[in-house]
Amino acid sequence: MMIHAAVLRDRTGPFGIEEVDLAAPGPGEVLVRVAGAGLCRSDLMPRHVPIVSGPVVLGHEGAGVVEDVGPGVTRVRPGDHVVLSYDSCGWCARCLGGEPSYCGQFFPRNLSGRRVDGSTSVTDAGGEPVAARWFGQSSFATHCIAAERGLVPVDASLPLETLAPLGCGIQTGAGTALLALRAGAGSTLAVFGTGAVGLAAVMAAAAAGAREIVAVDTHPKRRELALELGATHALDGADPETAARIAALTGGGADAALDTTSVPEVVLAAVTSLRPRGTCALVGSGAADVVLPPRALLGGQTLRYVMEGDAVPQQFIPVLIALWQNGRFPFDRLVRTYPLSGINDAERDFGNGDVVKPVLVPAA
Ligand SMILES: NC(=O)c1ccc[n+]([C@@H]2O[C@H](COP(=O)([O-])OP(=O)(O)OC[C@H]3O[C@@H](n4cnc5c(N)ncnc54)[C@H](O)[C@@H]3O)[C@@H](O)[C@H]2O)c1
Ligand SMILES: [Zn+2]
Ligand SMILES: [Zn+2]
């Protein structure tokens, strides 16, 4: 079928809205009419890292309505409302162990722009293949072919454009705080970088009753927003004394820290802000090498990467929706909607820090 999609052809150029041909859903795939798709920092990765070759349709925080299902699909049917999250195989040791974000096929299924067999569902007007199935979806489009494994059915009364960012950025921040770092009642958490991921961690830790939540950002508006959303303190990331200030605020170091910046000096500050045996989670997609002196971990601290908040989307996203409905997780405050045709404006405003979470809405 013919659809419209935002295609990135030149890694340094703008997105262009093109009419492209979308194949019918294959085995384990679903055709979704996209109602909205969030822009995550990871959508800009192909601009900096050569992970996908040729033109590509990005977008991996989609939400929409199922229009058709491919062979073998059993969990959804046409008309169902769904949030789209990442793909996984379902059968490797990590998937069977309930850790699908560490699936042995995570990279080929989510970051290659191809199906596992190397094919793609999108063809351009000249008949050339266009990379798709980005995080099992490629939702910067009016319609997409999504992996059944990444679908989270939601109640049809809920606003799909608002729910869209749950599929990656919001799940990642909240999951890292609650599932990976166990930021529960009475705990202390330092969050470095308060974009969508960091602010979701702040809101989730506040909802869980964390005692001190220290937000660190170089952007003054982000610090203000973090305080409004539950941070107990907000510090300027440019201050070289940040780690010492966090140690003072938490009575000897934070139980846990989260770095979303990938800036090597910030990662060092995040590790240094921990108490003995504390844990620092990295989630950023930046590629710079991080150098740590062994003494940074002398207190037996743990440093680890966290993918998608350690979350199983079908378990965790309904929890976040319930918290949001109860007024305890107001992630909708981060969202500003743009028409899909305004994707380049959305990228500009996101890059300036003017908007935390743009959501692109295809024309009806
Ligand atoms: N691991 C995963 O599963 C996963 C999922 C989603 C996003 N990500 C990655 O997580 C990162 C964060 O995503 P986001 O959408 O929140 O990005 P973002 O760009 O909106 O947020 C980053 C924040 O860091 C702040 N910052 C930059 N330099 C700083 C410094 N020196 N000190 C303090 N703050 C600083 C920025 O002002 C911004 O508010 C990105 O790299 C993204 O690709 C990873
Ligand atoms: Zn797997
Ligand atoms: Zn993402």
Image (cartoon, grey):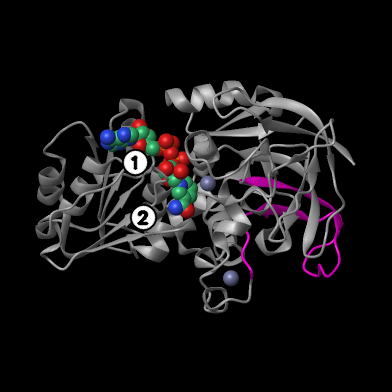
Q: Is residue 364 above or below residue 163?
A: above
In this rendering, the label closer to the viewer, 2 or 1: 1
Residue positioned 20% across, 53% down in the render: 271
Quadrant location of the C terminus in the rendered image: top right
Q: Residue at x 66, y 60 (%)?
A: 150
Residue 145 in view here: yes
Which callout, 2 or 1, points at the residue further toward the start of the chain?
A: 2
Q: Residues within 10 Å of mark 1 (few under 14, many from 20)?
A: many
Residue 261 has which mark? 1
Amino acid tagged 2: Ala
Q: Is mark 1 within 8 Å of ligand 1?
A: yes
Residue 205 lies, in percent from the top left, at 36, 55
Residue 298 place in picture, x, y as percent: 10, 64
| Secondary structure found at label 2 | helix
Most extreme residue toward the right is 1
Determine which quarter of the picture holds residue 347.
Answer: top right
In the depicted structure, whether residue 329 falls above or below residue 124: below
Report the Cα–Cα distance between label 2 and label 1. 19 Å
Judging depth in this view, the residue of 266 and 186 nearest the camera is: 266
> Does any portion of residue 86 appear in the rendered image?
no
Q: Is residue 62 magenta?
A: yes
Residue corresponding to mark 2: 205
| Picture quarter with the N terminus | top right
Query: What residue range appears in magenta?
Result: 61-89
Q: Are marks 2 and 1 in contact (CB under 8 Å)?
A: no
Residue 18 locus on image (x, y percent): 77, 28
Between residue 2 and residue 215, name the one nearer to us: 2
